[in-house]
Every structure is written in structure tokens, then in C-alpha cells.
Image: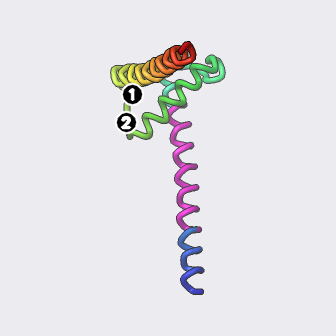
């Protein structure tokens, strides 16, 4: 019985620390986005929705990789990698659709 209550206390402690960490990460991401925009002298509300999403992704990536300054070359490489992966996926889908059409003809 004591083991179960000890496990519950441990579980609650871990859960609380995870929630606290996620909250701190969200605050840090918001801070990074704000810092980027202030350096550019731009208000986030004046940006199109797509730009707001891109800034949010950049801030998340910057925080996840623990980068203090954004490097345009790294950002470009990262975007190119994502685009390449998306194109590969689309290509595989098209190949499967083509194969499916050939099988339907037979």
C-alpha cells in the first residue's frame, strides 16, 4: 500500500515538473518571437498569418536547438530540408497512385 502511494506521489511530482517545463518553454518561445520582431521594428499583429506561423516555428526551432542568434544560412538549409522531405513524400504518393492506376487497368 505504501508503494502505491509513493508511486502516486512520484507520478504527481513528475507530471507537475513537465507542466512547469512546458509553460516555461512557451514563455521562452514567445520571448524569442518578441525579440525577433522588436529587432525588426515590426508588430506581430501587422504580419500575415503565414508569417506569424513561420516566426513561431523559427522561435521553436531556435529554442529547441538552444541557439542564441538566428543564422540565415541555417534557416535556409532547414527550410530546404523540409521542402525536400515534403517533395519526396509527394513523389512517393504519386508513384503509388500511378501503380494503383496500372493495377486497375489490368
Task: Say whether residue 8 is visible.
Answer: yes
Q: Is residue 34 left or right of residue 45?
A: left
In the drawing, what numbered circle is on residue 70?
1
Secondary structure beneath dot 1 equals loop
Q: Position of residue 51 (x, y in %)?
A: 57, 20
Q: Position of residue 75 (x, y in %)?
A: 39, 23
Q: Which residue is mark 2?
A: 67
Q: Is residue 18 left or right of residue 84?
A: right
Seen at 57% across and 86% down, the residue is 2
Count neighbours of disc 1 (C-alpha within 10 A) and say few if under 14, some if 14 to 19, many if 20 or more: few
Seen at 54% across and 30% down, the residue is 56
Q: Which residues are magenta?
A: 12-34
Q: Is residue 68 left or right of residue 19?
A: left
Q: Quadrant of residue 73?
A: top left
Secondary structure beneath dot 2 equals loop
Q: Main secondary structure of the magenta part?
A: helix
Q: Quadrant of residue 5?
A: bottom right
Gap between marks 1 and 2 measured at Cα? 7 Å
Q: Give yes or no for residue 22 being in the magenta stretch.
A: yes
Q: Position of residue 4 (x, y in %)?
A: 58, 80
Circles 1 and 2, Cβ within 8 Å, touching? The answer is: yes
Q: Position of residue 81 (x, y in %)?
A: 38, 23
Amino acid at each position: 500500500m505504501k508503494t502505491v502511494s509513493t508511486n502516486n506521489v512520484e507520478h504527481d511530482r513528475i507530471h507537475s515538473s513537465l507542466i512547469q517545463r512546458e509553460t516555461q518553454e512557451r514563455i521562452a518561445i514567445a520571448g524569442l518571437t518578441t525579440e525577433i520582431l522588436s529587432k525588426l521594428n515590426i508588430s506581430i499583429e501587422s504580419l500575415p498569418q503565414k508569417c506569424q506561423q513561420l516566426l513561431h516555428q523559427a522561435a521553436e526551432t531556435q529554442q529547441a536547438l538552444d541557439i542564441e542568434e538566428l543564422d540565415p544560412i541555417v534557416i535556409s538549409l532547414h527550410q530546404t530540408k523540409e521542402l525536400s522531405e515534403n517533395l519526396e513524400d509527394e513523389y512517393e504518393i504519386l508513384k503509388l497512385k500511378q501503380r494503383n492506376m496500372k493495377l486497375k487497368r489490368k
